[in-house]
């Protein structure tokens, strides 16, 4: 049974709250009413449109009413790290405002081996989900394009990550890990400026429309260590290197460079989700 008095206040200093459809600073049953009224009348004058895409899927529809009721019944507000920024990119791609697992844009967030959806304490090859280590040699069991790299000559010719192995899809509704093409677009069309935000080094990436996002230099995880925090950034993309399937594609950056390259799949890197506008 829905409790009509249920509401979640926010302070005036916070960013707009998805689900606060009527813009009164809290999520309550009145927001459900406001959303239904909008859907019936198409009159947006009494709602905050940016808060009304509750699921979010890039449009406001009856599915958002269901999502909002589910939030009220569960007593939970939407995850803040499901927010995206429109940088004005030609493709219409939206980039998440923070890393997977991060509370704030300057936080490192969580580290994942490529194609894994759980964090772990050890990022050595022997702990990597998609391989066997035979006589100290890594042999792949998924995403393998060459028999020489496959366990018992295994080949599946998969290059692009499947949805069930994409942690960005699990953490961000309608999100996914970026492709090399989306990363190339980000490099080619945006301005990148090395800067510091709340004590963390990284790049402020500003799009053609003037909107920006911050990519922290979160370093990486190898075996049980975290290295190069504040010095380098490493973010996984959604595909392996076909000519070298032990490696996956990534963006790598430091204060003096940012580029697309590859790295060993068992290493722990950060992830920034993207969403393609409908």
Image (tube, rainbow, N blue to C red):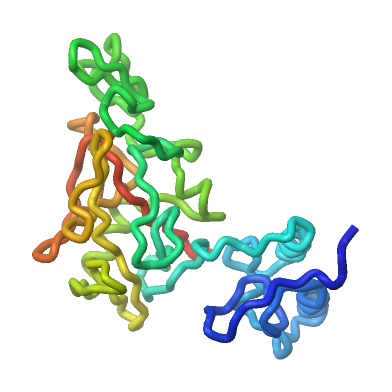
Residue in view at x 19 percent, y 17 percent: 137
From the viewer's side, name the closer residue of 118 and 34: 118
- Tell whether 177 sits left or right of 77: left
User: What's the residue at 65%, 66% (across, down)?
Assistant: 54
The quarter holding residue 25 reads bottom right
* Residue at the spot 36% in from the left edge and 62% down from the top edge: 107
Q: Quadrant of residue 89 in the image? A: bottom left
Tell me where residue 196 appears, x and y as whole percent.
Answer: 23, 73
**Relative height, residue 220 to residue 40 (above, below):** above
Q: Could you say which is closer to the camera, residue 85 or residue 256?
A: 256
Determine the image quadrant of residue 47: bottom right
User: The N terminus appears in which quarter of the rendering?
Assistant: bottom right
Q: Residue furthest left?
A: 256
Q: Visible in this render: residue 93?
A: no
When the figure is inspected, residue 113 is found, relative to residue 179, above or below; the finding is above
How many labels were placed on the picture? Answer: 0
Q: Position of residue 199 (x, y in %)?
A: 26, 70
As drawn, is 3 to the left or to the right of 189? Answer: right
User: Is 199 left, or right, of 51 in this rendering?
Assistant: left
Residue 268 visible in image:
yes
Which residue is pictured at 38% across the width and 75% down the height?
Answer: 88
Question: Which residue ends up furthest to the right in the rendered image?
Answer: 1
Give residue 278's position: percent from left, percent from top. 53, 64
Q: Residue 31's spot in the image, x, y percent?
A: 76, 76
Q: Is residue 50 left or right of residue 224?
A: right
């Amino acid at each position: 049974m829905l409790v009509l008095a249920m509401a979640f206040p926010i302070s005036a200093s916070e960013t707009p709250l998805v689900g606060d459809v009527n813009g009164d600073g809290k999520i309550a049953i009145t927001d459900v009413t406001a959303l239904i009224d909008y859907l019936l009348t198409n009159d947006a004058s009494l709602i905050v449109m940016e808060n009304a895409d509750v699921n979010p899927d890039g449009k406001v529809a009856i599915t958002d009413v269901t999502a909002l009721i589910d939030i009220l019944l569960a007593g939970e507000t939407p995850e803040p790290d499901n927010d995206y920024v429109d940088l004005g990119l030609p493709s219409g791609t939206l980039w998440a405002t923070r890393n997977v697992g991060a509370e704030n844009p300057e936080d490192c967030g969580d580290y994942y081996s490529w194609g894994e959806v759980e964090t772990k304490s050890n990022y050595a090859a022997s702990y990597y989900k998609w391989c066997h280590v035979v006589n100290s040699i890594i042999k792949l069991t998924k995403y393998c394009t060459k028999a020489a790299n496959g366990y018992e000559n295994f080949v599946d010719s998969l290059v692009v990550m499947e949805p069930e192995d994409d942690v960005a899809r699990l953490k961000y509704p309608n999100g996914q890990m970026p492709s090399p093409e989306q990363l190339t677009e980000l490099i080619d069309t945006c301005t990148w400026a090395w800067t510091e935000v709340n004590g963390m080094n990284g790049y402020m990436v500003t799009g053609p429309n003037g909107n920006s996002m911050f990519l922290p230099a979160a370093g990486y995880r190898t075996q049980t260590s975290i290295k190069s925090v504040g010095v380098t950034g490493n973010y996984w993309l959604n595909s392996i290197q076909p000519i070298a399937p032990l490696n996956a594609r990534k963006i790598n950056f430091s204060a003096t460079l940012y580029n697309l390259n590859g790295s060993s799949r068992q290493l722990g890197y950060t992830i920034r989700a993207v969403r393609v506008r409908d």
